[in-house]
Amino acid sequence: MDTTNPNLPAVALASPTPQVPPEVLEQVLIGGDLAQLTEAQRLAYYRAVCQSLGLNPLSKPFEYLWLNGKLWLYALRDCADQLRRLHGISISYGQITQNWAPLTESRAASPAASAVFATARVPQR
């Protein structure tokens, strides 16, 4: 008895995760250069990094970036947003004046640690 429906599209089975040769993996982990990996290996590495950090890879937390002749994973704002949510870190901003110069102050705090402050001069337009 044939139970297949000809009106439904065929679903391709997922191919196994490609194995990365140890010498290439060492080059990636130590040197940071992803250019030596194949597209399939880069995708597997991207997913592994996301999984290790608890990030959703479908939201594109990283982008590939060529820098100094190497291909790197560059963390985007979505990566920082997801990590802040995962770890309960709150961010607040304020403006203060010191010696008649406006300064922007930011504060990051987590439930498990004390707050961290940063102050910077913001050029006036």
Image (spheres, grey):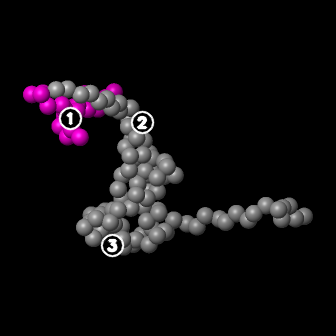
Which residue carries the number 3 mark? Answer: 23
Counting residues from the N terminus, which is met first, the one under dot 1 or under dot 2? 2
Query: Residue at point 67% right, 66% down?
Result: 12
Q: Which picture quadrant has residue 13?
A: bottom right
Which residue is the extreme one toward the right? 1
Label 2, secondary structure: give it: helix
Using residue 89 as the reference point, say whether residue 103 is left or right of it: left
Work out whether 43 lies above or below 75: below
Q: Which mark is residue 85?
A: 2
Q: Is residue 3 magenta?
A: no
Report the amino acid beneath label 2: Arg
- State the image coordinates of residue 22 (x, y, percent, origin top left): 36, 70
Label 3, secondary structure: give it: helix
Residue range in magenta is: 98-125
Q: Which mark is residue 84?
A: none
Query: Residue at point 49% right, 68% down?
Result: 40
Looking at the image, which is closer to me, 7 or 50? 7
Q: Which picture quadrant has residue 91?
A: top left
Report the amino acid beneath label 1: Ala
